[in-house]
């Protein structure tokens, strides 16, 4: 069994694979202060609830954009799984050529998404990852990671709006009942939903023109289902894209 960990700024998504089959998927909060034992106990508990055994894990691969907890996770893997974790980096056999000015600046999650998009959907491809930040990753037909765009995430926008205004309430991000809001909550939800969707489609249109060929467009991340439902440009919704990319990288390396 392969254990894949996608460590993001807000959450850690964990997937257990038996071959190509994803047999378990969990999401934990990224708590930077947690010890190796706390992480180990959490994993032991979620495995037990899913009738899985830690002893069946034969490999562990980690994609992390939170370097401060990498050492703790590595310690946990050694202590609870008696193995050495593989951390995603540009030194691996990626199957993609990184065209970033400095390849080491590319986030591990963006590399993994690029690998998954190209080898599962073909190229050219664009991944829209709607997480803490909204990232666009562009992969050519020649298996090149060309770069992309980074935009503030929906949660960041909501928090900033609430923190900087005296009268506007904190609201949930969801599809509004109508475009033109007739109350404050509806107006905020409409602005966020249609504004984000318009931004995504507008940037995808420009990226497609830049590529000169119609790409496969894949949305992933926590807010992806809402955006996919109204987008004119997103073709595929794959909430497990990063976990699948981790499995592919494990197999290549």
Image (tube, rainbow, N blue to C red):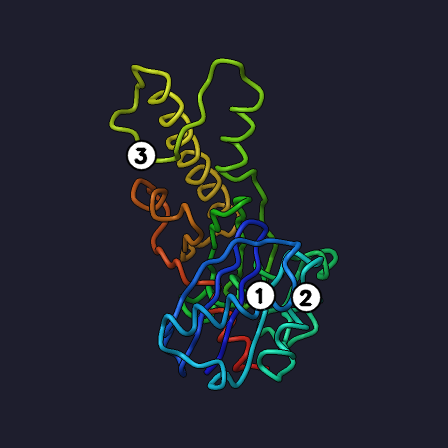
Residue 39 in sight from this viewpoint:
yes
Q: Is residue 130 left or right of residue 38?
A: left
Asked if the residue at tag 1 contacts the one at tag 2, i.e. Cβ–Cβ closer than 8 Å, the answer is: yes
Q: Earlier in the sequence, mark 2 or mark 3?
A: 2
For residue 227, above or below residue 221? above
**Residue 66, label in figure:** none
Q: Earlier in the sequence, mark 1 or mark 3?
A: 1
Q: How many labels does the image show?
A: 3
Quadrant location, the N terminus: bottom left
Residue that badge 3 annotates: 175
**Residue 72, label in figure:** 2
Residue that badge 1 annotates: 39
- Neighbours of disc 2 within 10 Å: few (<14), some (14-19), many (20+): some
- Residue found 40% across the figure and 57% down from its top: 216
- Residue found 60% across the figure and 53% down from its top: 31
**3D distance between C-alphas at marks 2 and 3:** 39 Å
**3D distance between C-alphas at marks 2 and 1:** 8 Å
Residue 214 in sight from this viewpoint:
no
- Residue found 40% across the figure and 25% down from its top: 191
Q: In which quarter of the image is residue 177?
A: top left
- Neighbours of disc 1 within 10 Å: few (<14), some (14-19), many (20+): some
In percent of width and height, residue 147 lies at 61, 54
- Neighbours of disc 3 within 10 Å: few (<14), some (14-19), many (20+): some
């Amino acid at each position: 069994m392969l254990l894949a960990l996608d460590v993001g700024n807000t959450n850690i998504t964990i997937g257990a694979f038996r071959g190509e089959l994803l047999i378990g998927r969990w999401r934990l909060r990224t708590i930077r202060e947690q010890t190796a034992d706390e992480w180990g106990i959490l994993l032991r508990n979620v495995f037990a609830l899913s009738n899985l055994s830690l002893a069946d894990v034969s490999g562990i691969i980690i994609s992390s954009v939170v370097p401060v907890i990498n050492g703790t996770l590595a310690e946990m893997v050694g202590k609870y799984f008696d193995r050495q974790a593989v951390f995603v980096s540009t030194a691996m056999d990626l199957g993609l050529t990184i065209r970033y000015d400095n390849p080491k600046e590319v986030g591990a999650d963006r590399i993994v998404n690029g690998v998954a998009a190209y080898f599962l959907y073909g190229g050219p491809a664009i991944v829209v990852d709607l997480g803490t930040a909204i990232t666009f990753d562009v992969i050519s037909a020649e298996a090149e990671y060309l770069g992309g765009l980074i935009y503030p995430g929906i949660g960041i926008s909501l928090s900033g709006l609430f923190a900087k205004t005296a009268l506007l309430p904190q609201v949930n991000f969801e599809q509004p009942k109508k475009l033109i809001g007739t109350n404050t909550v509806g107006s905020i939800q409409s602005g966020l939903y249609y504004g984000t969707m318009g931004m995504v489609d507008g940037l995808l249109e420009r990226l497609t023109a830049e590529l000169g060929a119609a790409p496969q467009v894949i949305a992933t991340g926590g807010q992806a289902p809402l955006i996919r439902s109204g987008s004119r440009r997103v073709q595929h919704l794959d909430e497990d894209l990063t976990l699948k990319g981790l499995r592919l990288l494990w197999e290549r390396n």
